[in-house]
Image (cartoon, helix red, strand yellow):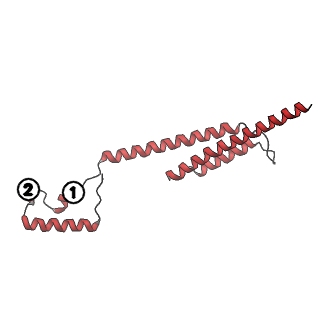
């Protein structure tokens, strides 16, 4: 754990130690200066902590990238089912893939983990919602065809 001392607290500590040193002369076996004493007794950030934090950050990044790629693949797979054209005559599959690509490119350099998480969750929800609606429409279409075939 890293101990943080504000400038005011450090100044107070230095003055107290100097006063104590002058009064009792007990520092003859220890460090030569008050700064050396502070350095010796303050918890320092060691190299291992720094490496552990870097590794954890890299793992989170890798995990986030993996999730983003997984979402992108799921979007590409899901768009296979959208094979009808829009009003311009372009297949919805192509429109959806182009929009997904644009969204991912726009968010490519986002560093804030909260925003990245929100984007990933929103993307998953959007894919699931689109597939749910597609399934519902297909069920309605099948039901409609059954009703028409039963009438004839």
Residue indicated by mark 2: 29
Local packing at callout 2 (Cα closer than 10 Å; few below 14, some 14-19, many 20+) is: few
**Label 2 element class:** helix
Above or below — where is 5 with respect to 49? Answer: below
Q: CA distance from mark 2 to mark 1?
A: 16 Å
**Quick one: 46 or 148, which is closer to the camera?**
148
Residue indicated by mark 1: 39
Q: Is residue 23 left or right of residue 128?
A: left
Residue 127, x across and y down, in percent: 65, 43
When asked about the image quadrant of residue 10, the answer is bottom left
Contact between marks 2 and 1 (CB within 8 A): the answer is no
**Quick one: 94 or 64, which is closer to the camera?**
64
**Label 1 element class:** helix
Q: Is residue 43 left or right of residue 140?
A: left
**Quick one: 150 or 80, which is closer to the camera?**
150
Q: Residue at x 25, y 66 (%)?
A: 9
Residue 42, x across and y down, in percent: 23, 56
Q: Earlier in the sequence, mark 2 or mark 1?
A: 2
Furthest residue toward right: 152
Residue 1, x across and y down, in percent: 30, 51
Local packing at callout 1 (Cα closer than 10 Å; few below 14, some 14-19, many 20+) is: few
The answer to whether residue 111 of the structure is visible from this angle is no
Q: Quadrant of the C terminus?
A: top right
Q: Residue at x 13, y 57 (%)?
A: 31
Q: Residue at x 30, y 54 (%)?
A: 2
Q: Residue at x 66, y 36 (%)?
A: 77
Q: Which mark is residue 72?
A: none
Q: Is residue 15 left or right of residue 118?
A: left
When asked about the image quadrant of residue 92, the answer is top right
The answer to whether residue 148 of the structure is visible from this angle is yes
Figure label count: 2
């Amino acid at each position: 754990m890293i101990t943080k001392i504000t400038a005011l607290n450090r100044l107070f500590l230095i003055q107290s130690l100097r006063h104590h040193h002058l009064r009792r002369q007990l520092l003859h076996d220890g460090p030569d200066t008050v700064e050396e004493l502070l350095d010796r007794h303050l918890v320092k950030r060691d190299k291992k902590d720094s490496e552990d934090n870097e590794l954890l950050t890299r793992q989170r990044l890798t995990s986030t990238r993996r999730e983003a790629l997984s979402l992108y693949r799921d979007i590409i797979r899901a768009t296979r089912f959208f094979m009808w054209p829009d009003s311009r005559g372009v297949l919805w599959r192509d429109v959806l893939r182009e929009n997904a690509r644009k969204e991912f490119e726009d968010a490519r350099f986002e560093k804030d983990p909260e925003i990245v998480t929100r984007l990933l969750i929103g993307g998953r929800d959007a894919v699931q919602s689109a597939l749910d609606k597609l399934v519902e429409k297909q069920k309605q279409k099948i039901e409609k065809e059954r009703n028409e075939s039963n009438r004839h």
